[in-house]
Image: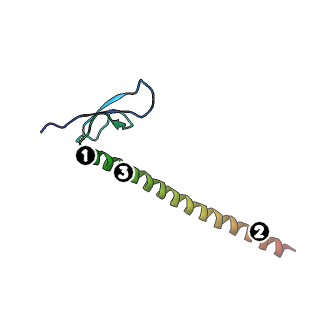
Amino acid sequence: MVPKQIMLTTGGASKRSQTVLYNPNDTSMISHREGTPIGDLTPHEEILYLRRQLAKLNRRVLNIEISNEQRLQREKIVYCLGLAYFVLKAIMWINRN
């Protein structure tokens, strides 16, 4: 069975958009950004294409959620350290007088 090659274009409205050959069995891409398929796709190919896009979006959302959780954790630590610093300074100032 020979893998079917689908013609893809990169996103953008320019007339000079690049055309990329995509092999579904090959994970390496010629272009960094996968575009919209040109031509008629069978319903099965459309479903596969949409599933692939959904998986990419899920990975991106997961990465954003993880980085957000890490940022929140860093903010909590910095907030606690800042609060402890000012409490210690206040105690030292009260004990000085």
SS assignment at label 1? helix
Residue 54 - label: 3
Q: How crowded is mark 1: few (under 14 residues within 10 Å), some or many (20 or more)?
A: few
Which mark is nearer the camera, 1 or 2?
A: 1
Q: Name the residue under label 2.
A: 89
Whole-number angstrom distance, CA of label 1 to CA of label 2: 68 Å
Q: In this view, does 85 lie above or below 43?
A: below
Choose the circle earlier in sequence order: 1 or 2.
1
- Residue shown at 44% from the left, 54% from the top: 61
- The amino acid sitting under disc 1 is Pro
Q: Mark 1 points at which residue?
A: 43
- Choose between 83 and 15: the one closer to the eye: 15
**Farthest top residue in view:** 16
Numbered label tally: 3
**Farthest left residue in view:** 1
**Farthest right residue in view:** 97
- Percent x, y for residue 64? 48, 54
- Choose between 94 and 83: the one closer to the eye: 83
Q: How crowded is mark 3: few (under 14 residues within 10 Å), some or many (20 or more)?
A: few
Which mark is nearer the camera, 2 or 3?
A: 3
- Residue shown at 60% from the left, 64% from the top: 77
Quadrant (top left, top right, bottom left, bottom right) of the N terminus: top left
- The amino acid sitting under disc 3 is Leu
Whole-number angstrom distance, CA of label 1 to CA of label 3: 16 Å
- Percent x, y for residue 43? 25, 46
Which mark is nearer the camera, 1 or 3?
A: 1
